[in-house]
């Protein structure tokens, strides 16, 4: 009986001791009781380039397909001067025909020369006017620039830079007009050559190519077009479903790889993404075509090669990054930060881009700071934290290589701390 009473008394005293400590901690309004947290797992915030990508399939195609026609009202066709598969340059001879009405043909060519010259002059004046145009300051009341903006331009986002967008649009418009000017000049040169040939040779006219490309089709039956030329420069094409179409815009960067040539990485830009799908049907998924322009030399790639296309829909370069499981949420997002003084801090954070379990922290965290992970039940605001010994980093040999002065200093510090 005596032993049982002692056991009961010991159990009661132990329980009372535990309850007393729990109540002291619970009612400790002034933080007089020192609490400690044992942290088993933790990780460091780091700097990283985050990329949000949209993977899809694509195929390489020629950037342009240019048809060449023959007007049988101008004369009688004579012969083709090129063959299928042949690469032609601007100004190379394509075919010959014999005119039936010299004066009518001469007047037609002269009128075409005059028209092209007028169009060239107008384009040159337009380019000069755009180049001389000064984009107003974005803070000015007249910052909205409608001089060269297309009618379909979308409303600018609040955080966008109007000046930068206007400058980009200006450069894009100039580039398009310069391309159009080059085509008109090539057409003018071709028509002037035809007119000169007519006046010097008489009845026979030789038609020259206004384009660079490869002859992919010759129609011996003279049905229009009688010749089809495809450009030697390549682009990538593909299709997006409805959900993907919402994420893609023109100007986005693209990474392209070929399945059997993974070591070859090609960079491009989304040059166009269609607003309307190829087909609209209740029973079928809508597919929106897109094109990717490529500036690199693709000499080893042929039209028709399939590719893996990765569209970069969002990015954060040099972002302070943390693993998603290290961030918690109650009402707001926060992290348990292990500070240099050995204390555990409950810190609110703001995040932005999240990719594959990595989160961009835009406010509340710096690269190199340590974040506590588990166990959550041990985490307390302002608590001193302990972490387990990393046995894999202990080197027994290093213990005996410390000089005597250092050993004495740390030994005395240990005794004083006790």
Image (cartoon, rainbow, N blue to C red):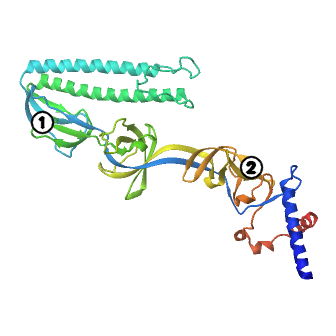
Q: Residues within 10 Å of mark 2 (few under 14, many from 20)?
A: some
x 85%, y 69%: residue: 403
Q: How crowded is mark 1: few (under 14 residues within 10 Å), some or many (20 or more)?
A: few
Q: Tag 2 or tag 1, which sits nearer the N-term?
A: 1
Q: What element carries label 2?
A: strand
Above or below — where is 258 with respect to 83? below
Name the foreground residue: 197 vs 111: 111
Task: Calculate the distance from the C-alpha at mark 1 to the C-alpha at mark 2.
Answer: 78 Å
User: From the image, which quarter does the N terminus lie in?
Assistant: bottom right
Q: How many marks?
A: 2
* Horizontal arrangement in the rendering, residue 35 relative to residue 52 (left or right): right
Q: Residue 346 carries which label?
A: 2
Across and down, in percent, residue 197 comes to: 15, 26
| Mark 1, residue position | 223
* Quadrant containing the C terminus in the rendered view: bottom right
Tag in front: 1 or 2 = 2
């Amino acid at each position: 009986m005596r032993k049982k009473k002692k056991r009961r008394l010991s159990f009661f005293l132990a329980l009372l001791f535990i309850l007393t400590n729990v109540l002291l901690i619970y009612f400790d309004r002034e933080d007089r009781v020192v609490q400690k947290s044992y942290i088993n797992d933790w990780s460091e915030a780091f700097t990283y380039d985050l990329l949000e990508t949209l993977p899809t399939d694509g195929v390489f195609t020629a950037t342009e397909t240019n048809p060449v026609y023959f007007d049988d009202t101008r004369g009688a066709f004579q012969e083709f001067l090129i063959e299928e598969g042949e690469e032609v340059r601007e100004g190379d001879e394509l075919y010959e025909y014999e005119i039936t009405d010299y004066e009518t043909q001469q007047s037609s060519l002269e009128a075409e020369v005059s028209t092209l010259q007028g169009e060239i002059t107008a384009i040159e004046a337009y380019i000069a006017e755009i180049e001389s145009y000064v984009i107003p300051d974005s803070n000015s009341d007249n910052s909205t620039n409608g001089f060269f903006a297309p009618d379909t331009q979308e409303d600018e986002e609040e955080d966008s830079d109007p000046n930068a967008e206007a400058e980009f649009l200006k450069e894009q418009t100039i580039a398009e007009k310069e391309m159009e000017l080059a085509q008109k000049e090539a057409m003018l040169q071709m028509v002037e050559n035809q007119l000169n040939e007519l006046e010097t040779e008489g009845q026979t006219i030789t038609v020259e190519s206004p384009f660079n490309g490869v002859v992919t089709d010759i129609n011996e039956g003279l049905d229009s077009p009688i010749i089809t030329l495809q450009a030697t420069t390549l682009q990538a094409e593909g299709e997006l479903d409805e959900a993907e179409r919402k994420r893609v815009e023109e100007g986005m960067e693209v990474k392209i790889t070929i399945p059997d040539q993974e070591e070859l990485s090609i960079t491009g830009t989304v040059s166009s993404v269609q607003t309307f799908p190829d087909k609209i049907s209740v029973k079928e998924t809508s597919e929106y075509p897109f094109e990717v322009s490529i500036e690199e030399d693709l000499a080893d790639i042929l039209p028709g090669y399939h590719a893996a296309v990765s569209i970069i829909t969002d990015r954060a370069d040099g972002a302070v990054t943390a693993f998603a499981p290290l961030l918690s949420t109650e009402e707001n997002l926060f992290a348990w930060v292990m500070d240099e003084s050995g204390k555990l801090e409950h810190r609110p954070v703001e995040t932005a881009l999240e990719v594959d379990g990595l989160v961009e922290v835009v406010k509340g965290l710096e690269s190199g700071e340590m974040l506590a992970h588990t166990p959550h039940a041990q985490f307390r605001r302002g608590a001193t934290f302990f972490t387990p010994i990393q046995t894999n980093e202990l080197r027994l040999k290093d213990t005996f290589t410390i000089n005597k002065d250092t050993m004495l200093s740390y030994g005395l510090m240990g005794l004083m701390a006790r």
